[in-house]
Image (cartoon, helix red, strand yellow):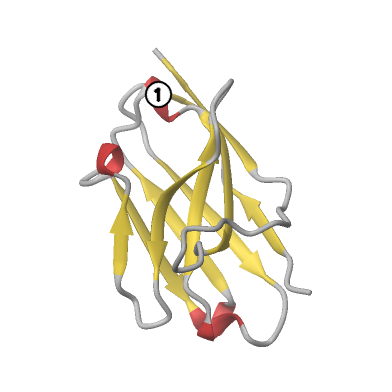
Amino acid sequence: QVQYVESGGGLVQFGGSLKLSCVASGSIFTIYAMGWYRQGPGKQRELVAGITSGGSTNYLDSVKGRFTISRDNAKKTVYLQMNNLKTEDTAVYYCNRAPTTSGTYPKDWGKGTQVTVSS
């Protein structure tokens, strides 16, 4: 079973930047489309950004132009560069496989990494 370990979160001021990393175990990482998700206080988990095995990307409208997802298949790592952070970006961030074509999220999750944006 593939496991994902997220890191890079922290406390940052409004307008600041953070870069999250996610290292995957397992040998078939390169064929998966991957995603960064987040769950804010009292909110449902949502997909923030996705990247296919070929490098095509998509983003939640509210983060377009501020967040960039990338991957290094040799390192089995997915990154999320977050710039111009806003207080509404405060959440626990998780990486995992991208949702299925029907929109179903994965069932098993790692611990995530907390991002807190102060005003």
Q: Is residue 110 above or below residue 16?
A: below
Q: Is residue 64 above or below residue 118?
A: below
Amino acid on which the number 1 mark rests in the picture: Glu
Does 93 sit left or right of 15 as displayed?
Answer: right
Q: Which residue extends farthest left? A: 65
Mark 1 neighbour class, 10 Å CA radius: few under 14, some 14 to 19, many 20 or more: few
Residue at 79 percent of width and 74 percent of height? 1
Residue at 63 percent of width and 59 percent of height? 106
Does 73 sit left or right of 59 as displayed?
Answer: right
Residue at 38 percent of width and 51 percent of height? 81
Residue situated in front as seen by the camera: 8 or 86: 86
Location of residue 118 by image quarter: top left
Q: Is residue 59 above or below residue 78?
A: above
Q: Image quadrant for the C terminus?
A: top left
Expressed as whole percent of the image width and height from the top left, the position of residue 104 reads 54, 58
Residue situated in front as seen by the camera: 5 or 44: 44
Residue situated in front as seen by the camera: 27 or 100: 100
Question: Which residue position is annotated with label 1?
Answer: 88
